[in-house]
Amino acid sequence: MADDALPLREHRGYVGAMTTAPAVDPATGLRTDGGPDLDHLALLAALQEAFAAGTRTADPAARVPACGRWRVRNLVEHLGRIHHWAAGQARRERETPLGRGPFDLVPFYTAQAAELHGTLVALGPDADAWTLTGRGPATFWWRRQLHETLVHLHDLRAAGHGSGVAVGAQDPVGVDAEVWADGVDEVVTMFQPRQVRLDRMAPLDRTVALHATDVGRVWMLGAHDDTEPGVPATTVHAPARELDLLLWRRLSPEEAGATVTGDPDALDAALAEPIVP
């Protein structure tokens, strides 16, 4: 990310920097400040390859931590179906039903991954697509499917190690902190406001500041317009990876090693809401 930050006031341990407006347009997945975009398609391909490799050696019956009753089989079939559905959304077509399964997991997943990536490459960045925010460019799906795959690759590795915490220490997903930061940005600027817009949750009563200590960025969860966000009720300090996994409920604040300043109840209240689908 470009170093285009403004100083923030000090309050309740809230010290850091905040970028001007959203650095990424949630409707397109592209930078708005002229800075370099992540290579979402290349990253997506690499993560899909890593997910397929992990599927080859995973126990289909292994429990997926932080995903309720899901087993690895459910996880792989879910991601394959999402890839297939997203490819249809990018083409503005209803997807062909894939059937109930069970499927032979590796060929099933690799076929859907190839369909998605091939579709996005063939369409190009400016193709008119159906997106989660309305009609928009296919680049929306470049970003969205990158982060869908990233979080679920973490899930797959967590299933192998028996916990999400163990993944960071023993088998971390090899992407830069900026990629995880982009995932935080997506939740704050696209998913949580969309959940409010769809009446799946009420607006947050109190703003939560998310300070990614490794990339020097701060997001205001619960502040979604161009007005002064005010003083946050609480600030969460952690690396971008841990913040992203915290927002997706893959790690608790304690498991993320987060430092929470201000009112911790504000963070608990935010995480208790369906800020992501």
Image (cartoon, helix red, strand yellow):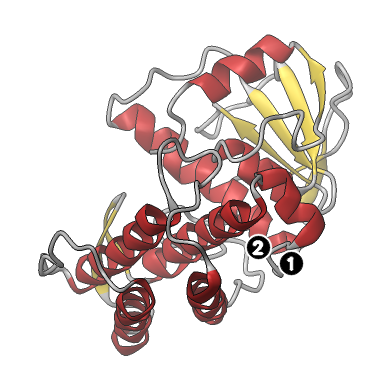
Few, some or many C-alpha atoms within 10 Å of disc 1 (few <14, some 14-19, many ≥20)? few
Count of numbered circles on the image? 2
The foreground one among 114 and 208 is 114
Residue carrying label 1 = 176
Residue carrying label 2 = 179
| Secondary structure at numbered mark 1 | loop
Residue at screen point 54% across, 58% down: 156
Query: What residue type is disc 2 on?
Result: Val
The foreground one among 32 and 14 is 14
Is residue 176 rendered to the left or right of residue 32?
right
Query: What residue type is disc 1 on?
Result: Asp
Residue at screen point 44% across, 19% down: 203
Q: Position of residue 194 (x, y in %)?
A: 36, 37
Is residue 15 rendered to the left or right of residue 71?
right
Q: Position of residue 189 (x, y in %)?
A: 51, 43
Q: Position of residue 249 (x, y in %)?
A: 56, 36
The foreground one among 74 and 205 is 74
Few, some or many C-alpha atoms within 10 Å of disc 2 (few <14, some 14-19, many ≥20)? many
Residue 13 sits above or below residue 139 on the image: above
Q: Position of residue 92 (x, y in %)?
A: 16, 68
| Secondary structure at numbered mark 2 | helix
Residue at screen point 60% across, 72% down: 37
- The answer to which image quadrant residue 170 occupies is bottom right
Residue 37 sits above or below residue 120 on the image: above
Q: State whether residue 136 appears in this view.
A: yes
Is residue 24 rendered to the left or right of residue 86?
right
Residue at screen point 52% across, 49% down: 186
- The answer to which image quadrant residue 122 occupies is bottom left
Q: Mark 1 and mark 2 in contact (Cβ < 8 Å)?
A: yes
The Cα–Cα distance between marks 2 and 1, rounded to whole angstroms, is 6 Å
Q: Quadrant of the C terminus?
A: top left
Q: State whether residue 3 appears in this view.
A: no
